[in-house]
Amino acid sequence: MISLKGLCKRYGDRMVVDDLSVEVKPGTVTGFLGPNGAGKSTTMRLILGLDHPTAGTALIAGVPYHEIRNPLRTVGAMLDARALHPGRSGHAHLVALARSNGIARSRVTEVLERVGMADAARKRAGALSLGMSQRLGIAAALLGDPEVLMFDEPVNGLDPDGVRWVRHLMRSLAEEGRTVFVSSHLMSEMQLTADHLVVIGKGRLIMDAPLAEVIARSSLAAVVVRTPHAADLSVRLRAAGIRVERPGENELVATGAAIERIGDLAYEAGIRLHELRTREASLEQAYQELTASSVEYGARKVGV
Ligand SMILES: Nc1ncnc2c1ncn2[C@@H]1O[C@H](COP(=O)(O)OP(=O)(O)OP(=O)(O)O)[C@@H](O)[C@H]1O
């Protein structure tokens, strides 16, 4: 579990993380979304004690990072896959990390196998492709078998196979009961990976809800009806306060009401239906609506 309470970070006169209160729960993949500069990486850095909050707290398993006795065994993170000594092999990097954290050397082999790079880990880190560096960064995060995992843009620059692999890994880590907190700009991928979403804009919380709810709340979510009496039904639905569009002679699209209500109103009016279905918005669409007013390459100025 990761708990943020009133978390704030100010750089100069900019509030880049602004009063964030969120609980990131175990057993789920929580996607962390927001436009460029929204404050996602800063929030992750604050959680990992790499920066000090201006106000508020960030706790992992109930304690601030600097009070965790065995950090690598409690939380694993990949913030920047390229942050490795380029001359050292991936294997040597993990062995050093394991040694300095009291983790058995056998665990290095285990995690390298889990990320599918048992062989490539013998190469110099500087000679690894971006995809392999990402895998190595993920291996390092998994080394201490931690209950909490954080990944900043883990699929950045990966090919479709790599993206799919990361998705399955995130899902299996959550199924093992771990807390998985992952940022990404790839909405189509997040829609397939995350159970829950935390969306921020200009450092502030915009949404903290299950993925399904975020998508259902989109104004583009609608009920599509096909009926030979579309004109009659439109009148009935509008009278009931439902927004209706008529894209075709025998078709209408209703928003702002559940599918059951549309079906009941049609039944009560004795109107025959040939089709009644929901139209889901994509996460991309829902996200664009949510963040429309936050897409700006700057944060709120303090006191403004
Ligand atoms: N050390 C720093 N000093 C001053 N400003 C900073 C510092 N680190 C980040 N910022 C600023 O804080 C804001 C938030 O940056 P951050 O990297 O957390 O956003 P992000 O949501 O991760 O963005 P992206 O999606 O582009 O990675 C940006 O305006 C950035 O320029």
Image (cartoon, rainbow, N blue to C red):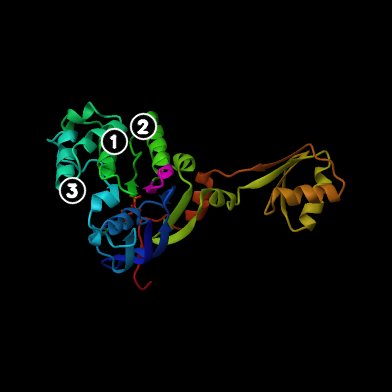
Q: Quick one: 301 or 269, which is closer to the camera?
A: 269
Q: Kindly give the residue lying farthest to the left in the view shown.
A: 87
Q: Earlier in the sequence, mark 2 or mark 1?
A: 1
Q: CA distance from mark 2 to mark 3?
A: 29 Å
Q: Is residue 146 left or right of residue 177?
A: left
* Dot 2 and dot 1 residues touching (CB under 8 Å): yes
Q: Which residues are magenta?
A: 174-183
* Dot 2 and dot 3 residues touching (CB under 8 Å): no
- Residue 63, compared with residue 269, is above or below; it is below
> Tag 2: Cα neighbours inside 10 Å, few (<14), some, or many (≥20)?
some
The answer to whether one can see residue 292 in this image is no
Q: Which residue is mark 2?
A: 162
> Tag 3: Cα neighbours inside 10 Å, few (<14), some, or many (≥20)?
some
Q: CA distance from mark 1 to mark 3?
A: 20 Å
Q: Quick one: 21 or 156, which is closer to the camera?
A: 21
Query: Nearer the viewer's eye, disc 2 or disc 3?
Result: 3
Residue type of the residue flagged with mark 2? Gly
Q: Quadrant of residue 82?
A: top left
Q: Which residue is mark 1?
A: 135
Q: In terms of image quarters, where does ligand 1 lie?
A: bottom left
Q: Which residue is mark 3?
A: 101
The answer to if 194 sits in the magenta stretch is no
Q: Kindly give the residue lying farthest to the right in the view shown.
A: 270
Residue type of the residue flagged with mark 3? Asn
Q: Earlier in the sequence, mark 1 or mark 3?
A: 3
Q: Position of residue 217 (x, y in %)?
A: 58, 53
